[in-house]
Amino acid sequence: MAGGKETPRQRMIGMMYLVLTALLALQVSNQILQKFVLINDGLERTSKNYVQKNLFSVNIISTTVEQQGNNKVDIPKVEAANEIRQRSSELVSYLEEAKTRLIEESNAIDEQGNFRTSALKNVDIPGNIFNNNRLGYEMQERLNSFPDEITQILAGLKINKSFEKIAKDANEIDLFKNDVDVNFKDYVNLNYVKSPIGAVLAIISQHQNEVLNIESEALTEITNSLGSFIFEADKLKARIAANSNVVAAGTTFEAEMFLASSSSSTELNMTAGGQAIPVEEGFGKINFSVPPASSYDDRGLAARSLKGEIRVPIGGVDSVFTIDYDYFVAQPVIKVSSEVVNQLYAECANDLVIEVPALGNTYAPTFAVTGGQSIKGSKPSDVTIIPAASGKVIIGVSSGGNKIGSVDYDIKPVPAPTIRPFNGNTQIDLQNPTTANGLTNLQIRAIPEPTFGRTMTRDANFEVTAGEVRLVRNDVPRESVAISGQNVASRNLLAQAQSGDRLVIIAREVTRTNFRGNKIKSTVNEVFSIPIK
């Protein structure tokens, strides 16, 4: 971010936005839609906290300037703070109207005020509203104009502070800029076209948070530019403002704890969960890794409570203010990508991509396999699973030492290959006689089952390694040659062949070379007859 080091809150906002947009690429289940609703609820709750905090900041600025005698240098700062508050409020209301329109046109809420899951899955209405009717492009322009407007207001106060734009195209987002399948999409197509209503609501709520965060930072800059004073508060109340009260297991819980109406000149001591936390300009910075819960409810949530404590000297005596903050740990969704993901082939190298999208860049997986072995891939999410001979294979997924969950699959036996005779690259037609002279390059091939051959190329190397080819005349075997590989040494045999004879091919053994180079033999009994004309 231009203008200074990115704050933890800004990093969290960026991560949440990337997680929300990345989730849009997933096949949307009812469980994921419910989580979008919960995330949206948390974001809306955070917006309300932001509004309260920003209103308090505007009042502080006004009170401070008044107590300091309405200095002509500081009076414009009160006007600027009110203007920033107004522009932020207008933009947040505009975004709220967009959400209301989306809900009304989709009939997404029933008579009891609950979201309809079927409506939340709709992917056509967002595209119509935001793309076809151009609301998304209007929204993008207003969102990206807002940071510049706030920067200009601050510049009028000789405060050098700038902000990143909010509504970005795919090529402006680190997660997508190198992805050729996505990086050509603009903001509207990335976020709203073919996106479910539940996800779009969360995206717009996140934008509201970003607007209010820019407002908060701007008001903080104005407050810091005022002269020092002693603010004597008559009401004191402890507060925690979190980015969301729904936190995915394995991610980081981030929030601010503060004492409403506190003075910047007062030294505050704060703890959260029994641990001391750093205090910056009167705000405590809460940051801790959230371990997975032992159990989750039917919504995939586990209730948690955080106890905070603020100690402040008032009148020479330490006063202690406590607060209990309730939040939820959301069970992360494990996403497995593979062409053979429904069943894994026994004793073969099954290449999987195992991801937990909610963890974003914090995802640092380890895999524990029961009923098989694993080999780490070149990327953190890549893993090769080698199941046992039969049964089930269970893959436990952990990140940063925290267990996320597990997935299990049936173990599928390697399908037997199809054995066919070839003359060079041409399969021999067993129904029509052929000349002995025409069989110049007799081959006996073991062809893998199509799906196995396509998905398991490193394990689908079959060869007929035992059997024989007999020259039969009047149903009496004459000469024969052994089969010990794909190519058959049949020249001398064919030189003796006459019209009416048959070549009888008997395959008795097939050998498969696996991904490690090991030879795995299996017994077969395949017989073919080639008529000679």
Image (cartoon, grey):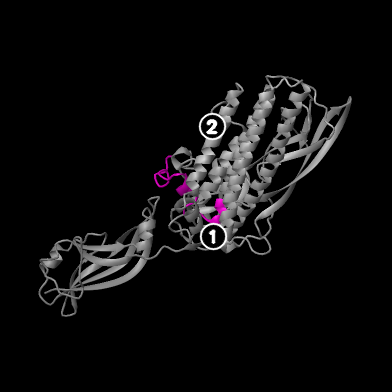
User: Magenta part of the protein: which range?
Assistant: 177-200
User: Which quadrant of the view contains residue 108?
Assistant: bottom right
User: Residue 384 in magenta?
Assistant: no
Prevailing SS of the magenta stretch: loop
Residue 415 vertical position relative to residue 273 in the rendered view, above or below: below
Left or right of residue 417: residue 9: right
Which residue is denoted by mark 2 in the rendering? 148
Residue at the (47%, 47%) spot, across then down: 188
Left or right of residue 96: residue 136: left
**Near-viewer residue (234 or 428):** 234
Residue at the (54%, 28%) spot, across then down: 2
Type of amino acid under label 1: Lys
Give coordinates of residue 358: x percent, y percent. 57, 47
Answer whether residue 53 is visible to the viewer in this image: yes
Badge 1 marks a residue whose secondary structure is loop
Residue 279 numbered mark, or none: none
User: Residue 194 in magenta?
Assistant: yes
Which residue is denoted by mark 1 in the rendering? 121
User: Within 10 angstroms of label 1, few (less than 14), some, or many (20 or more) residues?
Assistant: some
Type of amino acid under label 2: Asp
